Image (spheres, rainbow, N blue to C red):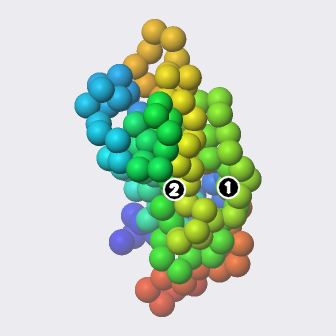
Amino acid sequence: RVDREVQLLENRKVTMVQWRIPNILELKRDTAKGKYIVSPIFSFGGLHPVVFHFYPKGDEYAEEGFCSLYMHLPEKCSPVKRTLFAGKYKIGPKEATDTANMGESEMCVLGNIIPKGKDFVIVGAEDIEVSGEYVEEGQTFLA
């Protein structure tokens, strides 16, 4: 619990989070459409837990070849303004909550974001702004 509180304080002013996904060629080959991988849990702006869901072959709504990226926020959190990115492709800024605008079904064509001769991709969110306040377990975290 103490470690988590320290993490919340240290990550309070974070405006960008990126996730390096290794072995992307294997994931692209072996992950079925509609299936995702989950990032490690992270925090920013007093919000915890936050995770990314990355669909190498896209979610059920994505066109063939597209990957999907979603950022899942804690329940009942304040709105978060953010821009999602996958490699050099960016979508946003958009305001997201725990139930709306969580991600992009057609983020980009996966093959376009794998660096030449490499086996990883980098996805994430930038220009992150948390508005209002967030209440968790009786504690208030001002944003």
**Which residue occupies the foreground of this view, 5 or 14?**
14
Q: Is residue 20 above or below residue 96?
A: above
Residue type at the position of mark 1: Arg
Which residue extends farthest bottom? Answer: 138
Q: Is residue 86 above or below residue 16?
A: above
Q: The N terminus appears in which quarter of the rendering?
A: bottom left
Q: Pointer 2: residues within 10 angstroms few (<14), some, or many (20+)?
A: many
Look at mark 2 in the image and give the residue it sits on.
71
- Using residue 69 as the reference point, say whether residue 125 is left or right of it: right
Query: Do callouts 2 and 1 mark residues in contact (Cβ within 8 Å)?
Result: yes
**Which residue is painted at 61% across and 40% down in the image?**
85
Look at mark 1 in the image and give the residue it sits on.
82
- Using residue 135 as the reference point, say whether residue 119 is left or right of it: left
Q: Which mark is residue 42?
A: none
Q: Is residue 74 above or below residue 12?
A: below
Q: Position of residue 26 (x, y in %)?
A: 29, 25
Q: Position of residue 69 (x, y in %)?
A: 50, 47
Look at the numbered disc 2 and give the secondary structure of its residue.
strand
Residue 49 visible (yes or no): yes
Q: Earlier in the sequence, mark 2 or mark 1?
A: 2
Q: The C terminus appears in which quarter of the rendering?
A: bottom right
**Which residue is painted at 46% across and 9% down in the image?**
117
Which residue extends farthest left? Answer: 30
